[in-house]
Image (spheres, grey):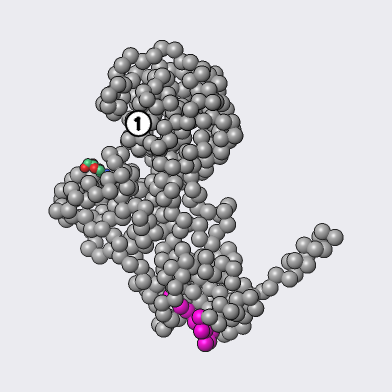
Amino acid sequence: MKIAFILSLVASVPLTYALYQKSGPVQILDHRNFHNLLEKEPVALVEFFAPWCGHCKQLAVPYGKVAENLKGMVKIAAIDCDEEDNKPICGEHEVQGFPTIKLFKHGKVQEDYQGQRTAKAIADYAVEQIPNMVKKVTDKNLEQFLSDKNETAKVGLFTQKAATSALWKSLALNFKDKAIVFQVRDNQKSVLELFGITTFPTIFVLPGGDSPIVIYESDEIKAPALNKFVNRFITSEQTSDQETFGKSKTEVDSPKSQVNHLTSDIFESLCLAKSSKAICAIAFLPSYSDSQDEWIHTLDSTVTLAHKLNVKNFQFFWSSGSLSEKILKVLNFEAKLPAMVALNGRRGWVQKFQGDFDKDALQDFILATKNGDGKRDKIDMEKFSGWSKGDSTEPVQEAVAKEDISVTAEEPTAEKTPGQHDEL
Ligand SMILES: *[C@@H]1O[C@H](CO)[C@@H](O)[C@H](O)[C@H]1NC(C)=O
């Protein structure tokens, strides 16, 4: 019975997607997702087609190439007008013949594409539609630039070119209101000097406040990889949803993480401060690695488990680069990365973890810390005293009390962390 039912389902799947594969780079639209998906896209091209039409078949290959090429930059979509349920949408858009390509901005149709149906012509047209929101930073406006929205992540490109590339424009558009995307020309001496940039192109992020810069070290200068990289510096409320377009949850490249990037501000105010009841669980990750997403994913799973264990006062972060080096040094932790610590600045102790960085091991570590099992080292708080202004040089309390991390402890100073920890 069951098998017969499944077979009949398979058999009834229409062949109307024959021009474009569902998993391919061209986003398949239908009457259900058409408005919702397009609304989110600042710039999108939509091809209205019929699978039997000869010109549509001819267009399929170049159109697919455009989509592949502009992944993460401009959404390239298509809708099958032969499909009964889609006909009203095609009618509404007054499609006269197939294929018709229309330009959409935030779900609103702008115009019909009138150019040649080659991959190059279509791609050129598509990227011309990306507005330029990239800030140009010069020796003259540098100071103003750094003081403006100082807590917002700034993403910089140092380049020998005067023009702004489509890739960089699309990054600025994708992270509009979430990060500031800028570029600096190689003749702006003071800017280069301040950041110590000597090679071009260089991409980096200023995570916000006084947190040290994080350089993008991958050779993959492509929109999906860059979107992912920048996404790590966006706090949860601001998480860009552009990556989720048209993908099922499991396929999403940069899921909204429950684990924040650690900044020195947060480290001081939340992890070190005497007034804070939080225990900071900090994962130290190698600066740039292809596995970084995987590790953050592992951390996410660990946090989900931790929620179930009701470890209310734990706050989870990840750190890499110079801030993490600094912290590890003060903690006397010569770990092979990735590694983790649980740290209580108020009580002045740290518990260290290294080994297999998987969710079972991390969960065990969190549980052991919560239960007061395992070895705790005293932190030499004086070494952090430059960071945590105020009382951190006071003698550290000797006793490491179990009740410190009791499961019913008060909510940690949640307002100090960006979002998402309100469940902890
Ligand atoms: C914030 O201002 C400080 C001091 O000018 C500067 O060093 C830092 O890079 C700025 N951070 C951002 C993200 O603008």
Q: Is residue 193 left or right of residue 310?
A: left
Asked whether 120 falls inside the magenta stretch, the response is no
Q: Is residue 333 left or right of residue 25?
A: left
Which quarter of the image is occupied by the N terminus? bottom right
Q: Which residue is depicted at the point 39% across and 59% down?
A: 174
**Looking at the picture, how far across and down is residue 245, in whole percent?**
50, 60
Q: Quadrant of residue 165?
A: bottom left
Q: Mark 1: which secondary structure? A: helix
Image quarter for ligand 1: top left
Foreground pick, 63 / 268: 268
Q: Is residue 98 left or right of residue 379?
A: right
Q: Which residue is depicted at the point 39% across and 50% down?
A: 230
Q: Which residue is depicted at the point 27% across and 45% down?
A: 150
Q: Which residue is depicted at the point 43% across and 18% down?
A: 377
Residue furthest to the front = 410
- Asked if 71 appears above or below 307 in the picture, the reply is below
Q: Quadrant of residue 167?
A: bottom left
Q: Give the number of callouts.
A: 1
Q: Residues within 10 Å of mark 1 (few under 14, many from 20)?
A: some
Foreground pick, 415 / 315: 415
Pointer 1 residue: 269
- Asked if 85 appears above or below 10 in the picture, the reply is below
Q: Is residue 359 visible to us here? A: no
User: Magenta span covers which residues?
Assistant: 93-103
Q: Given the image, on which type of amino acid does mark 1 rest? A: Ser
Foreground pick, 147 / 407: 407
- Asked if 54 appears above or below 148 in the picture, the reply is below
